[in-house]
Amino acid sequence: MPKTDLKRKDLRAAVAAMHAGIERKEAGASVLAVANSSDILLLESAPSLDGSENPKEDSIFLLASITKPFMGTAALQLVEQGRLLYSDRVSQHVPEFACFGKQNIALWHLLTHTSGLADEAGEPVWAASGDSQAHLDATCRSFLHFAPGSEWEYCNTSWWLVGEIIRRLSGLPYPDYLRQGIFEPLGMRDTGFDFAGEAAGRMMPVHDLEEHGIVSDEEKLHYFKSIQMPAGGLWSTALDLVKFGQAMLKGLAGNGTPVASRAGIATMTRLHTAGIRERGSNNLAAYGLGWGKPGFHTNTIGSERAFGHGGATATLLWIEPDYDLAFVYLTNLWGMDNRVAHMCLNAVLAAMA
């Protein structure tokens, strides 16, 4: 694997793209990080358009769906420990899930968004501000949009089941498992579902686009944090995400990582949805086991081996093994797509030797 041959001056286009995106109101206050498997090549922050929010290198952002790769890695660890198979039916581990035609849904279906589970089954729980157990119960009672494996549909509801499988097999609630199995071994001290004390003061505000209303005020944000949503509740810093990205790069290169084997990382980050089309759009799906892959929705140049994930706060973590690259973009606009993050990523990739 070649080392990333970049200097700060080569990344000026990426930094300019970040500032331009903020000026277009497509991103809020932002932090951009670029690294290879051993070094941080760029760590740059930018204030919000009105200057009211000026993040620092250690500011903590809501990752939203970048949570899913961490949950996928936790599931992989259980597979590597011989406690679980990707082909295991969910009902083997969560028997109450086996109703309304869901008996044949496997862990693989949950991790690839091919389960067919209806996300709207959880809407009454959200409306009632139900706790995490209520969300899990609603998922167990949910119905199907299509036969498992026949189509692809992005589904947040299914991750309550991933979390419950982790809990029942490990004996730890999934937030504790993530901390002990991933965050602590990698030295990710600023990653979690909520923070107190000094770290709480570093948490960035989250701004909803008007039509979403998920975290638009302190009461809603408090509720969101309280349920520790396994599909999208993690907060972190750019530096912590770089550590996670570097662990994936080192593991794939055979240089070791405390969180997963080379074979395991290669398995969960390869394309698993070849030939499967998205429900509604009919676009070809591009997903691994908890990780996104290059495809219609990514708009990213680079290699087929790349993998990563975006979040509903316009965030992005992207890893390019062929270029020894880990890329992080964090911002705080819930409901905005990560167009700016992908523009910055493409500028970084274009600058590589």
Image (tube, rainbow, N blue to C red):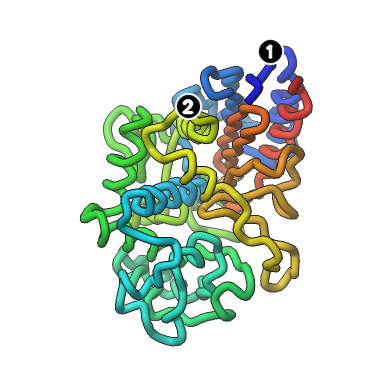
Q: Is residue 170 left or right of residue 348?
A: left
- Residue receiving disc 1: 7
Residue pushed farthest bottom?
A: 100
Q: Is residue 174 left or right of residue 220?
A: left
Q: Secondary structure at mark 2?
A: loop
Quadrant of the rendered structure where residue 341 is? top right
Lower sequence index among marks 2 and 1: 1
Binning the other alpha carbons within 10 Å of mark 2 as few (below 14), some (14 to 19) or many (20 upward) gives: few
Percent of width and height locating residue 225: 36, 50
Labelled disc at residue 255: 2
Amino acid under disc 2: Asn
Measuring 23% from the left and 52% from the top, which residue is drawn there?
172
In this view of the protein, can residue 120 be seen by the observer?
yes
Instruction: Measure the alpha-carbon separation of dots 2 and 1.
Output: 24 Å
Quadrant of the rendered structure where residue 95 is? bottom left
Q: Secondary structure at mark 1?
A: loop
Measuring 37% from the left and 30% from the top, which residue is drawn there?
186
Binning the other alpha carbons within 10 Å of mark 1 as few (below 14), some (14 to 19) or many (20 upward) gives: few
The residue lying toward the viewer, choosing from 117 and 253, is 253
Percent of width and height locating residue 210: 60, 56
Measuring 46% from the left and 86% from the top, which residue is drawn there?
101
Percent of width and height locating residue 82: 32, 54
Q: If the image is split into quadrants, where does the N terminus sit?
A: top right
